[in-house]
Image (spheres, rainbow, N blue to C red):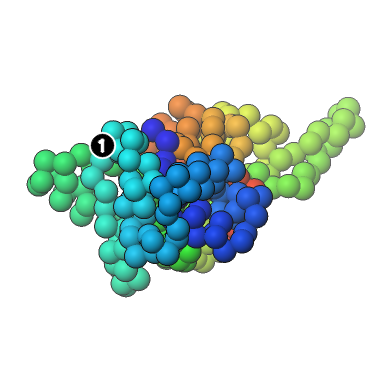
Amino acid sequence: MANKIKAKLALQLAEAGLSANRIEQVHRISKKSQKEVREAAAALGITYADVADLSDDEVYRRLFPDRNNHASVFVEPDWEKVHRELARVGVTLQLLHEEYRDRCTASGGIAMGYDRFCREYRSYTLANNVTSRVGHKAGRICEVDWSGPKMQLVDPDTGEIIPVYLFVACLPFSRYTYVEPTLDMKEGTWLLCHVHMFEFFGGSTPMIVPDNLKTGIASHPAEGEVVLNDAYREMAAHYSAAVIPARVRSPKDKPSA
């Protein structure tokens, strides 16, 4: 199911004079979605001033009333409260997800999984221009990637020069780093490096932040669900971790790695 268009933000930025290209690059709202928002607002005679005090969901429903039937089946968390709670010492996104899941169970609602919960929280921080609070707590995130520069291995018998690739993992809070040289960057090697990484760290982290490499991520559209490779998703689930890929062309999402 695709995520809802960030209609309120798109309307605000368009009226502020930002170009469609700039909005797409910085805020990840496609030009097609921007056009839909502008046309819907014009047809209804709505300006940003008319909806400035409304929530994102209310603005979306007002602009696209015929799409309400496609709303998520999951209970929507109070993201503003989640964001406030994360500022407290000892509170983690995983803990808040467990509390949210318990509330849904008690009320008979359907709770979203931890992966989706993390992605939706990130979308909330982006849509509301607030700083995510999940990236600077010890043991919360592990950033992983292949290193850009390659090394070389010389076969002592033949003299053949063999390229060597570096798998890099980093815990951003402490900058504690694990590096493993490999002879290829295939999916099996990628998964095995993760296993070695967790053995080295002595445990797993609730979130893994990789790049959008094909060995792990099957699809990462600008809008909609991220699709993980089956083996990568199953490996992460085995270690009770959620894979939250960095946004496309957004190296600051994993600066430590």
Mark count:
1
Q: Is residue 156 visible?
A: no
Q: Position of residue 156 (x, y in %)?
A: 85, 34
Helix, strand or loop at label 1? It is: loop
Q: Residues within 10 Å of mark 1 (few under 14, many from 20)?
A: few
- Of residue 242 and residue 16, the one placed in the foreground of this image is 16
- Of residue 148 and residue 93, the one placed in the foreground of this image is 93
Q: Position of residue 73 (x, y in %)?
A: 26, 36
The residue that appears at 45% across and 27% down in the rendered structure is 230
Horizontal side of residue 66 vs 11, given as left or right: left
Q: Position of residue 44 (x, y in %)?
A: 41, 47
Vertical relation: 51 (above or below) 189: below
Q: Is residue 243 visible?
A: yes
The amino acid pointed to by label 1 is Val
The residue that appears at 31% across and 52% down in the rendered structure is 58
- Of residue 10 and residue 253, the one placed in the foreground of this image is 10
Q: Which residue is mark 1?
A: 73
Q: Quadrant of the C terminus?
A: bottom right
Horizontal side of residue 143 vs 234, given as left or right: right
The residue that appears at 34% across and 48% down in the rendered structure is 62
Horizontal side of residue 254 vs 46, given as left or right: right
Q: Position of residue 192 (x, y in %)?
A: 53, 35
Vertical relation: 129 (above or below) 27: below
- In the rendered image, the residue lying farthest to the right is 159
- Of residue 51 and residue 252, the one placed in the foreground of this image is 51
Q: Quadrant of residue 18?
A: bottom right
Q: Quadrant of the N terminus?
A: top left
